[in-house]
Amino acid sequence: MKKRGIFILAVCFLSIPVLSHAQTTTGSEITGTGGLDLRMRNDGRMLVRSRIPVDANIDYTPYLYKDFRKASIILLKGDTVEGVYKYNIETEALEQSGSDRIIPWNIVKSFTLDATAEDGTKSFSNIKLAWPKSPYGGFIQDVTSSPFVKVKHYLEFIPSNYDPTTDIGSMNDEIKTLSTKYLKVNKKWIEIPNTKGAFYNLFGSYSDPLRKYARKNKLKFKNPEDVGKMVTWVSKRKN
């Protein structure tokens, strides 16, 4: 667990040594010691999705998964990095096990985390490559069932909403890990609605047939992989 209260260094680029032509490396050549990140521009604008107040004094974990996992990382220049890493969704960087070295999002094309006993293989892409007009940088999770569906994981500060007059709400501020699903429609990425009716309405005249297909195949609109299967089903019928 991590207690928020660290100094965020405002930088736009990390100074990294140049590797030779495409090669496989363990990651030790990528950066120096950790501590730098790409969360904030010099003008104070946040460059990543996670938005946590600097003075928030709350215990939380900045990692998407609690354990380190074997990873294969493809850099923008074409090199492949292999090792054991954690994905830090607060800084949008990959942190190497047993080392203070980090790989920031702005030099990575994509990466894959190997499956564990409890979880399957996970793949992520640089969000600026998948979605050039995204308002923030970092990584976005790929969905194997469709390239038109992706998931963004991030940390969100949730302030206390306790009302003493009704004794309802949370008395404490929280930092939660949240996820937002996106669908590419007409070359634009849109947020997938949280309600079933609004979700199916995205597909216009295919809405009712899609409902029947989803019901028959036990697909859930809140499951990204199931959404990908539904999108693929509709695409085949449009073509």
Image (spheres, rainbow, N blue to C red):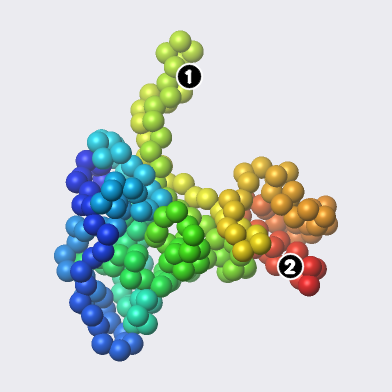
Across and down, in percent, residue 160 comes to 39, 27
Which quadrant is home to the C terminus?
bottom right
| Residue at numbered disc 1 | 168
Instruction: Give the amino acid type for the residue marked by disc 1 in the picture.
Output: Ile
Across and down, in percent, residue 203 comes to 75, 55
Distance between the alpha carbons at the discs numbered 1 and 2: 46 Å
- Name above or below for residue 98 compared with residue 221: below
- The quadrant holding residue 172 is top left
**Which of labels 1 and 2 is toward the front?**
2
Q: Is residue 50 left or right of residue 192?
A: left
Any part of residue 232 in sight:
yes
| Residue at numbered disc 2 | 235
Callout 1: SS: loop
Across and down, in percent, residue 221 comes to 66, 52
Across and down, in percent, residue 88 comes to 33, 57
- Name above or below for residue 239 compared with residue 39: below
Which residue is pictured at 69% across the width and 49% down the height? 199
Work out which residue is located at the far left of the displayed protein and give it.
Answer: 33
Circle nearer the N terminus (1, 2): 1
Q: Is residue 220 left or right of residue 181?
A: right
